[in-house]
Image (spheres, coloured by chain):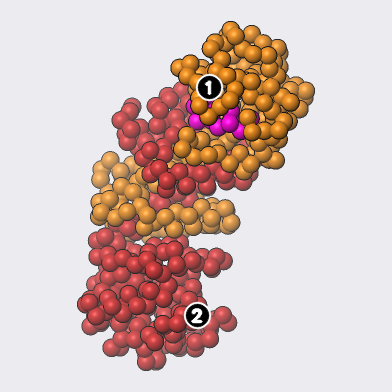
Chain colours: A orange, B red
Amino acid sequence: MIRIVVIGTGNLGTQLCSAFEKSKNCTLVGYLNHSNRSLDTLQAPLVKSLGTLPVCDLILLCTPDDTIATISNEIKTNAIVAHTSGSVSLEAVSNHKNHGVFYLPQSFSKSRTARFEEITICLEASSSKVMEQLEFVGSSLSRKRKHLNSSQRKYLHLAAVYANNFVNHCYLKTQQVLEKEHLELELLEPLMKETLLKAIEMGPYSAQTGPAKRADLTTLETHKNMLDATELDMYQAITQSILKTYGTEL
Amino acid sequence: MIRIVVIGTGNLGTQLCSAFEKSKNCTLVGYLNHSNRSLDTLQAPLVKSLGTLPVCDLILLCTPDDTIATISNEIKTNAIVAHTSGSVSLEAVSNHKNHGVFYLPQSFSKSRTARFEEITICLEASSSKVMEQLEFVGSSLSRKRKHLNSSQRKYLHLAAVYANNFVNHCYLKTQQVLEKEHLELELLEPLMKETLLKAIEMGPYSAQTGPAKRADLTTLETHKNMLDATELDMYQAITQSILKTYGTEL
């Protein structure tokens, strides 16, 4: 039984705590958060400070990126210390002999229960012994695990910005364009779903359609005239990128 | 029984032909395509030319946008003539007394069977009598139907560019960033799915996360340095649009 302390109870931290409490291989022995607020949903005790951590095998940092190195430096322990960030390097926790990274490339929310079993858990470790432990903890959440070094994880995180942040912003623009004619986003939900399924099945390169792909200048011009000045930059930049990709740059 | 002729057997035309052949309310009495090629999957006969159209109640134009008006002008008929384009106005077929639009906001492919029952069929008609007929044909495909005028449909089509063309291009960029570190797009499939489900459940405005949303300049700078010159424009334009949306324009 691996004894785990989770530091930080944001979206990811909270869901990990719950998952570890239900796990057969791991047990949550405590958790901390900056507001010193105990969570009704958990049985493990709230730990009041970094100076009073319970005996454990793994400390998981689920705090904001820019706090990881500082918090790591305040911890005195022989346990493994691992962070869960996509964009922070392994070095941030290297003040501990046994350290690692336990990164889940997913977007977590309080209101939606994470399906850990679908996620590939991306691991990095200071030694093969630490890796073995992280693998074991990871196996309690998902059968899919992968070893990534800090550079690979950095690119994975950038890729996630496109797949999540940018895609979601395109959905917002979709909604805003529809609102101009008092139409609901719901009208395009089947298209949003099909877009995803097609990209997965055919690959996004082959799945591309639309006026930019076929260099249909008349439609592109019509669209430009329908957009506000503030919307033009983004519309043009993505359009140019598609034109470039398919060899029809204007 | 409504007798239908479909002109154009691209992705949409082919799927509509199959659907009408299976329908209880409609029957496909013929189809045309520019290559004069008959399709094994259909029982209805290939019609050789616009001059020899069989007797029918509805002629559906499923040809490229820029051919609709021309083809419409070549047709001599008393039947309803309707086109299926998101970006072409009703006028393009107005040389016929009874005319309309039968638009399905979806991305169709040869390799994937369309689920018409999920799509809201967007209708416009020259008269209430024509609308009644289009409603009846639409009801054989989906329970969801909506009356949209040409301006509404134009904005719906622009919105679809964001929801499909631009989102798919973000998926391509995701894949290209991953390839730099020899990683597979599969790794981010759960994130792509969750991004869609979150946007639908919470609305895209609330679902937004990431460095641009929280104006995390350090991460934005790191990302810029990881991108090729050709990728910067699009990355910057979407980032600026997110910053603007959440009131943190730089």
Which x, y percent locates residue A98?
71, 17
- Residue type of the residue flagged with mark 1: Gly
Disc ID at residue B208? none
* Mark 1 crowd level (few <14, some 14–19, many ≥20, 10 Å Cα): many
The one of A14 and B44 positioned closer to us in this rendering: A14
- Residue type of the residue flagged with mark 2: Lys
Which x, y percent locates residue A234?
36, 42
Which x, y percent locates residue B64?
39, 70
Position of B54 relative to A58 (above/below): below
Asked whether the viewer can see residue A237, the reply is no
- Say whether marks 1 and 2 touch (CB < 8 Å): no
| Residue A134 appears left or right of B150 | right
Q: Residue furthest right?
A: A129
Label 1 SS: loop
Which x, y percent locates residue B118?
44, 63
| Magenta-highlighted residues | A7-20
Disc ID at residue B22? 2
* Mark 2 crowd level (few <14, some 14–19, many ≥20, 10 Å Cα): few
Picture quadrant of residue B238:
top left
Q: Residue at x 57, y 36 (%)?
A: A105
Q: Which residue is mark 1?
A: A8
Picture quadrant of residue A76:
top right
User: Which part of the image, by quadrant, shows the C terminus of chain B?
Assistant: top left
Inter-mark Cα distance, 1 to 2: 57 Å
Picture quadrant of residue A153:
top right
